[in-house]
Image (cartoon, rainbow, N blue to C red):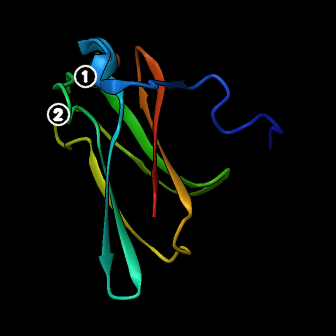
Amino acid sequence: MSDAPVLSGVQMVADLESAGDFEKKHTPWIAIEAEGDRTRVTIETGHHVPHPNQPDHYFQWIGLYAGEAPIARSDLSPVATEPSVSFLVSLDPGTVVRALAHCNLHGIWAAEAVV
Ligand SMILES: [Fe+2]
C-alpha cells in the first residue's frame, strides 16, 4: 500500500460555483443523511452537469473514504448502471468523508463533506 496521501494525483475543485462545465461534470456530489444511529452517504457524479455514460467514456468506480481510510467502493459498468451509489456507514459526527470518482478518460476527482 502506498504512503501517498489519498488525494495525491486527485483533482479537487476548490470553488465549484465558479468552475467550468468540465470540472462540474466530474466532481462528485455528496449527500449526508442520518438514518437512525447511522449515516447514509450518497455519492453521484454528473449531478452538477451531466457526464457521458457510454462504453468509451464513463465513471469506472466511486469510492468513499473516512479521512484517509478507504471504507467503501463500487465498480460501475457504462450504460447499464448509473453513476450514483449509496453507503450506510457508522462514523463519528464531525468525520470528514471524501468521495472519489474515476472517469476512464479524465482521471480521479474528489469532493469532501462532514458527517
Ligand atoms: Fe470524463
For this orientation, the residue located farthest to the bottom is 36
Q: Which amino acid does label 2 sit on?
A: Val
Asked if residue 102 shows in the view, the reply is: yes
Image-quadrant location for residue 32: bottom left
Q: Quadrant of residue 3?
A: top right
Residue depicted at x 39% and y 24%:
15
In the image, what residue type sits under mark 1?
Pro
- Disc 1: which residue: 55
Q: Earlier in the sequence, mark 1 or mark 2?
A: 1
Above-or-below relation of 60 to 66: above
Position of residue 114 measured from the top left corner of the image (x, y, whole percent): 47, 57
Q: Which residue is drawn at 20% across and 36% down?
A: 47
Check the picture and name the quadrant holding the C terminus. bottom left
Q: Can residue 57 be seen in this view?
A: no
Asked whether mark 2 and ligand 1 are closer than 8 Å, the reply comes as no
The quadrant where ligand 1 appears is top left
- Counting from the top left corner in percent of width and height, residue 48 is at 20, 31
Secondary structure, mark 2, is: loop
Pointer 1 and pointer 2: residues touching (CB < 8 Å)? Answer: yes
Residue that carries the numbered disc 2 in the rendered image: 79
Q: Work out whether 2 lies above or below 19.
A: below
> Along the horizontal axis of the image, is 96 left or right of 52?
right
Q: Residue furthest right?
A: 3
Q: Residue at x 55, y 56 (%)?
A: 96
* Quarter-of-image position of residue 18: top left
In the rendered structure, the answer to whether residue 83 lies left or right of residue 64 reads left
Q: In this view, does 49 lie above or below 114?
A: above
Residue 56 x %, y %: 28, 16
Residue 64: mark: none
From the viewer's side, name the closer residue of 112 and 56: 112
